[in-house]
Amino acid sequence: MKFNLLSAAAGIPAIAALICILSCGTQHPPVLPGYGLMVYDSIRDADYFLSLPALTAETDLPRETMLPPHHLTIATRGDLYYFMDMERKIFAEYRVTPTGLQKQREISMAAVPYEPYDSWMVWAGEHTLLLGNRDGDKFGCSVIDPEAMKLLRYVTLQTPPAPAGLNYTAVSAQFVQQRLLLFYTYQKGWMREHLTPPSDTMYANVYGYPELQLQHTFPDTRTTWPGSYNIWGPNTLHLHDTAYVLGQPGGRTGNHPSAPSAVLRATGNGFDSSYLFPLTDNKTTEAYTLHNIGHGKAITKVVASAGVTRFDDYLQQETAHYELLDLVARTRKAIPAGNIRLSFNHDVLADDTTVYLPVYLGNNKSRILLYHLKTGSITPGITVTGRILRMDKLTENKFK
């Protein structure tokens, strides 16, 4: 690239301009403003991506673009998306551009095991992504540097053996105080079968970092089932060097007979016995997903159990509603957004004043509702074609 310095008479201003041009040229393209949405269009039977400047009702809809084939969204950071191509066993980086998602780089993952059920992802600092999975009767963890796009290593995590006839299930994770906390329980059979109740206990394995050696295993019998399809939906969050984890009734129609949905708190020293935030009574309602909206608050989805007789009722019937949780004060508040279909996705966003909540309207249409935290009121936002699968802030340079 050639630069015209104008003339020597330009002196210092021209040199300064050149330095600016050179330094700016080494930076990534600017992050696009707004939001990224992934939707499933049932009429076209395809997944699409939209980038939007805002989510308010007056926002013009852009032209949607196809999502990468065989994609599984692993993580986002600003305008970068990281996908796993399950067919080619590729970990790929895509950037949001005005014409859609453009592939940047990829890593072969053919040498390491990975299966999305019972999988999890956490960021261990600014440059390291931990991508975990259950590998038969063990847990495994791929350590990835997304900036360099390198698979640094694969670690088989030490784990106490499962009781005879039972399997690990409902796995989720958080990274706090330079330790990996891995939450799980046991179940006869497999989670995807939705048939068998989980065990009475939630467990937390604590691994030191970066060596990822098991330090302790802590049990807690106050609730169970600390995960779900966790790579798709959030079930834990990190606040003030502490992990908050949602215990659920179980594998949907294979629910535990007595364990309530409740939030527990844990650090590298184990579960906090003084903290219990019960959300349901296990008789009439169930709570699923824990969406971090900042400032110690979260959104969960509460299901009326009477409306569920089969697994599809969770996803195809309006059996759930949104609730706002204050995890520090241990208070909860129903959000006046009406009944919704349950989803296990990263599909809730928030800023300091507003929470953005998707609602499926039927007839292949969804609307985003704006819940105003100060007033507790709802205003309608943008309407899109399809069912919303995921929402991200393209300008948020945070790990997700």
Image (cartoon, rainbow, N blue to C red):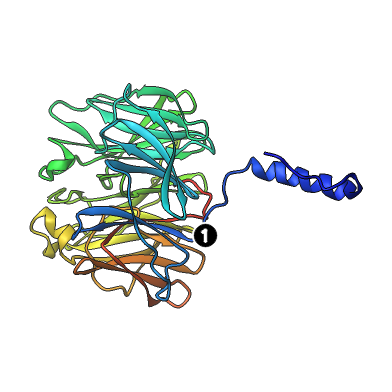
x and y, in percent, of residue 283 in the image: 16, 60
279 or 321, nearer to the observer? 321
Identify residue for label 1. 33
Examine the image and state in which quarter residue 75 appears: top left
Q: How many marks?
A: 1
369 or 134, nearer to the observer? 369
Q: Is residue 141 above or below residue 317?
A: above
- For the point 10% across and 44% down, the residue is 195
Q: Is residue 274 above or below residue 320?
A: above
User: Does residue 24 appear to the left or right of 354 in the view shown?
Assistant: right
Examine the image and state in which quarter residue 48 appears: bottom left
User: Does residue 41 appear to the left or right of 130 in the view shown?
Assistant: left
Q: Is residue 315 above or below residue 221?
A: below
* Residue type, label 1: Pro
Q: Provide the secondary structure element on which disc 1 rests.
A: loop
x and y, in percent, of residue 107 in the image: 40, 29
- For the point 23% across and 25% down, the residue is 137
Residue that extends furthest to the left in the rendered view of this protein: 309
How packed mark 1 is, by other alpha carbons closer than 10 Å (few <14, some 14-19, many 20 or more), is: some
User: Does residue 226 appear to the left or right of 351 in the view shown?
Assistant: left
218 or 89, nearer to the observer? 89
- For the point 32% across and 75% down, the residue is 336
- Quick check: can you spot residue 245? no
User: Does residue 201 appear to the left or right of 324 in the view shown?
Assistant: left
Residue that extends furthest to the right in the rendered view of this protein: 9
x and y, in percent, of residue 111 in the image: 33, 21
